[in-house]
Amino acid sequence: MLLKLKSMIQAWGCKMQKITITGGLGRDGELKTTKAGEDVLTFPVGVSQGFGDSKTTNWYRCSMWGKRARNLQQYLLKGAKVAVAGSLQIGEYEGKTQLNITVDDALPIYLDVGRC
């Protein structure tokens, strides 16, 4: 199976970048339905790195498709922590780098700080 997938990727000339991130949602997930009737949920995830004056945040524009998107919408609210896995596409828009993830899986993270 793996060899078949590898040969298909080579034949298509594709390069795939898989990524897993953990961060906070910058706004509530927005669910839309395409003209074809497919659900798509979009949400921004911020991942901070560094500390003090050198702290920076990278923002990823995430999109999730299908029934899972509809089911997860109620949990993906602004400020919630989430782990996201998917395919990374890097593009540019109006001179700014865009980090887009087509989500394969997303998992809301619930932390009970009082028990740590």
Image (tube, helix red, strand yellow):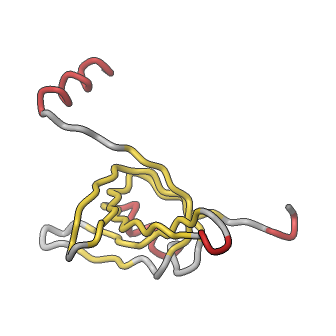
Quarter residue 113 falls in: bottom right
Residue 27 falls left or right of residue 64: right
Residue 96 in the image: state x and y as whole percent.
Answer: 28, 72
Residue nearer the viewer, 70 or 6: 6
Q: How many marks?
A: 0
Question: x%, y% of residue 7?
Answer: 20, 22
The residue under the point 39% across, 50% down is 86
Please report the residue visible at 35 percent of the width from the left and 72 percent of the height from the top.
42
- Figure check: 88 above or below 7: below
Residue sitting farthest toward the top:
3
Residue at screen point 59% across, 70% down = 55
Q: Nearer the viewer, residue 55 or 22?
A: 55
96 lies left or right of 8: right
Q: Quadrant of the N terminus?
A: top left
Q: Is residue 43 left or right of residue 33?
A: right
- 48 w.r.t. 18: above or below: below
Quadrant of the rendering where the C terminus is positioned: bottom right
- Give left or right: position of 72 versus 9: right
Q: Using the image, determine if residue 31 lies above or below residue 102.
A: below
